[in-house]
Image (cartoon, rainbow, N blue to C red):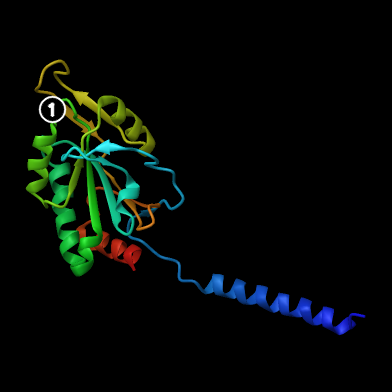
């Protein structure tokens, strides 16, 4: 025969365990970011695009690192070099954790941005930064995945056109989950603080 109090004690034990779990969940520190928190988004799933060295790259290749994805092109006069220069400073501000930062620059101008050109362009900023060289079809797919806008402006049939494109960046945590949308001009210190939290 089961003693009536033993059943009651079991329920009380379960209740205490549930309460403890609830309190632990409530007491977990919610991360507060300078950039826009987009945790739970579905950006960038399953792309495989060659980098400037000819190696196919996926987000999963960078497990354990924070990945910053930015769309641009080598002839961009302002937004692209400014963003990449800012990422160089972010890496410096992170100190030893800077080795766990992986920027990925996806060209929106595959017609002119050859792998050789992209490799030389990245070397102007940091040789560890990678540029991805999509085909026009891959670019359309990955841009749609990130909801990124890009369009030729000017002489579309010639070589003197420019590219309009979205200026924000996307930050993925070390588990490969998209976490942040970074507006252009946020600043290196603010972004470094956000990335330090993700790495922590």
Would you name the residue on which mark 1 appears? 112
| Quarter-of-image position of residue 87 | bottom left
Q: Residue furthest top?
A: 157
Residue 45 vs residue 166, the one in the foreground: 45
- Compared to 135, does 129 lie above or below? below
| Quarter-of-image position of residue 188 | bottom left
Residue 91 vs residue 162, the one in the foreground: 91
Residue 75 in picture, x, y percent from top left: 10, 34
- Compared to 5, does 155 lie above or below? above
Q: Is residue 122 left or right of residue 194?
A: left
Q: Is residue 166 left or right of residue 153?
A: right
The secondary element bearing badge 1 is classed as loop
Residue 48 in picture, x, y percent from top left: 31, 37
Residue 43 in picture, x, y percent from top left: 39, 42
Count residues near mark 1 (Cα–Cα under 10 Å), then give few for <14, some for 14-19, many for 20+: some
- Compared to 81, does 73 lie above or below? above
Q: Is residue 89 left or right of residue 64?
A: left
Q: Residue at x 24, y 58 (%)?
A: 101
Q: In which quadrant of the rendered image does the N terminus lie?
A: bottom right
Q: In which quadrant of the rendered image does the C terminus lie?
A: bottom left
Q: Residue at x 21, y 57 (%)?
A: 187
Counting labels gives 1
Q: Residue at x 19, y 42 (%)?
A: 131
């Amino acid at each position: 025969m089961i003693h009536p109090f033993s059943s009651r004690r079991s329920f009380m034990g379960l209740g205490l365990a549930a309460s403890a779990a609830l309190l632990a969940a409530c007491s977990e520190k919610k991360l507060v970011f300078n950039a826009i928190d987009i945790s739970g988004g579905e950006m960038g799933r399953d792309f495989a695009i060659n980098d400037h060295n000819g190696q196919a790259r996926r987000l999963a290749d960078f497990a354990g690192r924070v990945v910053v994805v930015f769309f641009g092109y080598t002839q961009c006069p302002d937004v692209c070099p400014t963003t990449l220069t800012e990422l160089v400073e972010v890496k410096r501000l992170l100190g030893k954790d800077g080795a766990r930062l992986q920027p990925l620059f996806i060209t929106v101008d595959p017609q002119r941005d050859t792998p050789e050109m992209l490799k030389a362009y990245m070397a102007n900023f940091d040789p560890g930064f990678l540029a991805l060289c999509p085909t026009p079809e891959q670019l359309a797919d990955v841009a749609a995945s990130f909801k990124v806008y890009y369009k030729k402006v000017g002489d579309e049939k010639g070589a003197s056109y420019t590219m309009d494109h979205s200026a924000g960046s996307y930050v993925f945590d070390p588990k490969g989950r998209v976490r942040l949308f970074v507006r252009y001009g946020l600043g290196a210190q603010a972004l470094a603080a956000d990335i330090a939290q993700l790495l922590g």
